[in-house]
Image (tube, helix red, strand yellow):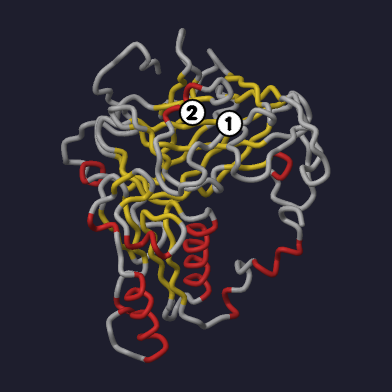
Amino acid sequence: HPPWDPWWDWADLRSRYGRTSAAVLGVSGWYDEAYGPDGATTNFAGLTTARAGGPSRAAFVIGPWPHGVGGTGRTKAGDRENGPDATIDYDETVLRWMDHYLRDVDNGVDREPPVRVFVMGDNRWREADRWPIPGTRSDTLYLAAPGQGSRTGGLSARRPDSRRPTSVYVANPAKPVTDAYADRSGAHDYRALASRADVLTFETPPLAQDMEVVGAIAAEVYLAADAPDADLWVKVLDVAQDGTAYNLMAPGSDVIRASYRDRSARRSLLEPGRVYLLRLPGLLTGNTFKQGHRIRVHVMSSFAPNYARNLQTGASETESARTRSARITIHHDARHPSRIILPVIPSRQARDPQAPTEGSIGKMKILRLTPQDDL
């Protein structure tokens, strides 16, 4: 069955939260399969809305883990060390929930904050009574073309002008961008992606202060192609001062097929040369980009072997094996401001206007300038 076919409605809970009174605990990880953190947060929001005015009997825990119970007892996810607080006792967590809601044990579960998420980088837990976390603000970073002699574009809080309005790459399904760590879930160093001609790279200068991002990063990208279909991947990475570039989530929420951009069962192929706005609203993570780190965004059209490849012919991969290359143009000018929107939890300085400031996403202070730091 194709995406968005009504057949899949049997598995969709979003219109049915009012039909259950069950107590629901969601447990997932930022590196879980994409449906994991999405399901945990979506179901929590749906249940609390449906049960407004009464006990929500809903909660969720999201840690820095891959898929599977085993990861909840390890401090490392892939190659990233998350510190001694990164683990939980999975059995105890679930049994305490069941003890209270199935056996009426007064163990305090119903009085604990229902939202508990791990913030990588800071390596600590955040708790809240709602989701998104109260106080979260939306900060925008716009994609900007590379400067003269550079392959790396910018990410800036400044809305773009039209001096260098597009970036272009050629996507070939027969020679796709590959995931070197497809067999190992978790965080890995993806710095090598920046060297590929079929991957666009955009990044900030080194950050002047820590930036805590918790929730759903959104991407809005203006794309044109000379083919009837293409996939769009938008990957967000945390780049350390030594060049290590960690992914912040498992593949899945960071990809959209252009022909399904309307999120309906009926495909809508692309008109060659026409510019389309593609939205990816749910890149879920919890990460503090530390002072001196960079926020990097990769834009590309494949990430094999994750998900079925787009043939770029307009035919379905279930019916054909013939492929074609496509010239993909990403627009980032004043009329087509491609961007990412970050759910930022303000620092103490940002919350307190009287506190001294060291810089922010809106007024980016650069720690050091190098020739490639073109804004």
Query: Where is residue 113 shown, x and y percent of the image?
Result: 31, 69
Residue at 41 percent across and 61 percent down: it is 131
Q: In this view, which residue lies farthest toward the top?
A: 149
Dividing the picture into quadrants, the one containing residue 242 is top left
35 is higher (above) or lower (below) than 188: below
Residue at 32 percent across and 79 percent down: it is 109
State left or right for residue 339 relative to residue 224. Answer: left
Say which mark, if any, is on residue 242.
Answer: none
Residue at 63 percent across and 45 percent down: it is 307
SS of the residue at dot 2?
helix
Identify the residue position indicated by label 2 in the image: 193
Dividing the picture into quadrants, the one containing residue 209 is top left
Image quadrant holding the C terminus, namely: top left
Image quadrant holding the N terminus, namely: bottom right
Crowd class of label 1 (few under 14; some 14 to 19; many from 20; radius 10 Å):
many
Identify the residue position indicated by label 1 in the image: 177
Query: What amino acid does circle 2 point to?
Result: Leu
Query: Where is residue 356 shown, x and y percent of the image?
Result: 16, 36
Please state the total of marks drawn on the protein image: 2
As rendered, which of 313 and 58 lies closer to the eye? 313
As rendered, which of 97 and 51 lies closer to the eye? 97
Mark closest to the chain's N terminus, 2 or 1: 1
Crowd class of label 2 (few under 14; some 14 to 19; many from 20; radius 10 Å):
some
Q: Is label 2 in contact with label 1 (beta carbons under 8 Å)?
A: yes
SS of the residue at dot 1?
loop
Query: Where is residue 296 shown, x and y percent of the image?
Result: 42, 31
State left or right for residue 129 relative to residue 284. Answer: left
How far apart, in angstroms, are the residues tagged by discs 2 and 1? 8 Å
Residue at 47 percent across and 25 percent down: it is 194
